[in-house]
Amino acid sequence: MSVLERMSGILPDTAAVNKGHLAIGGCDTVDLAGRYGTPLYIFDELTLRHNCMRFVAEYGRRYQETRVIYAAKAYISPALAHILQDEGLGLDVVSGGELSIAKSAGFPMESVYFHGNNKQQEEIDLAIASGVGRIVVDNTYELGMLDRAAKKAGVTRDIMLRLTPGIDAHTHQHIATGILDTKFGFPIASGQAEEAVAAAMKASNLNLVGLHAHIGSLIYSAEPYEDAIDVVMRFAASMKKHGLALKEFSPGGGFAVQYTIDKPAPDISYYAEAITNEVRSRCIELGLELPLLVVEPGRAIVARAGVSLYSVGSIKEIPGVRKYVAVDGGMADNIRPALYGSRYEALLANKAGEKPAERTTVAGKFCESGDILARDASLPRAGPGDLVAIPVTGAYCLPMASNYNASLKPAVVMVREGKSRLIRFCFNDAAPPENYTE
């Protein structure tokens, strides 16, 4: 079985093997490494666009009033913002920094939803001044601060309330956000959510248009979404006594993607079918008007579109124990294995036509024993100078990257139809190279 057949579920749509080398977007990865250096993050534009189009289509054909909002925390750049805008997606931002990236790209502010559990005053002021479409309020402190800021600015702002419905999404504890004991949102069970609705309805400069309930990330089953929708819709119906008319509802995002060969993820259509059916059914049962449905994929848009590329350096073989292949990146550009115990596959980009010959653990260069990118990967025999490619690294790697050990953050390129463009440079020079386009 070829590497493309083994990894068809995790490589970008345009992945191919040409003359024994891995190619993405029609570009030879060995040539990309020679031109831009390593570590290097490669994004396939056609995979990005295809994922955007599928979300819009799968939800839109099942539930007419749907809005797809990309979760920028997964990864954002001006180049990606332009693609999202082209494909008709909105943007979910969680900081003034992400909002500023959107502004720098000319992204339409009315299509931006501003999240975050501890928004700072300057971030709220920036959101109001920028005219973002929705501010998703996370707590009572923010509700008052936002109302005062809007009044001072002489405007009324549309808001949603983020609720915690008490639903376990059955994911890693660090990315479970819908349970009662979480830093996010107004808990329904404690009565704080009802207090927030009452306060928001009385606020002089806020217009409560909807409810939001993001329950976590990497959720492989539709059942937690269905349970959360049921809880929130029943809550919404009970809030009519405070004058709430639910115009918008968001179950958030958190849709799973496939990272390894042995753990496939459900298709977009699986989530779309379950979520739209549950919203419609509960609204009919409870006598609610169908709200605008807002879904917020992040990882599911960018993860598979990204591949990271590294150069092999030292090799350590412990007979009868393990073979370590060390590369020139690691936990500074991808902390997910160290932080979450996340698993990845690996392949040799310059030997993509060769069959696996040994089990190898791909280790990073940083001064931590936990700096491991891929354990027990099936690779051809690797040596110094070979190129290791790690698929499905488009989400949460670059946003969480650091300068640990005073390392530089990697360059990022976008590829399409045999052409590459640098969208983030990584050089010691103060000025970007000539072909830098952002």
Image (cartoon, helix red, strand yellow):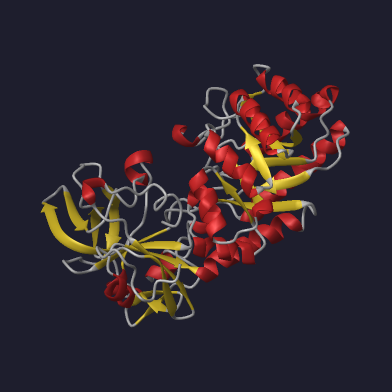
Q: Position of residue 99 (x, y in %)?
A: 55, 49
Extreme right residue here?
Answer: 287
Q: Position of residue 435 (x, y in %)?
A: 38, 76
In the displayed structure, does residue 256 sit left or right of residue 392? Answer: right
Q: Name the foreground residue: 93 vs 119.
A: 119
The residue located at (66%, 48%) in the rendering is 131
The quadrant the N terminus occupies is: bottom left
Q: Name the foreground residue: 193 vs 429.
A: 429
**Figure check: 430 above or below 18:** above
**Figure check: 199 above or below 345:** above
Q: Position of residue 237 (x, y in %)?
A: 82, 28
Q: Position of residue 275 (x, y in %)?
A: 70, 44
The residue located at (34%, 68%) in the rendering is 432
Residue 37 can be seen in this image: yes
In the displayed structure, does residue 240 sit left or right of residue 155? Answer: right
Corner quadrant of residue 352? bottom left
Extreme top residue here?
Answer: 190
**Figure check: 216 above or below 371:** above
In the displayed structure, does residue 355 sit left or right of residue 298? Answer: left
Corner quadrant of residue 227? top right
Extreme bottom residue here?
Answer: 19
Q: Name the foreground residue: 383 vs 297.
A: 297
Corner quadrant of residue 279? top right
Residue 354 can be seen in this image: no
The residue located at (73%, 27%) in the rendering is 200
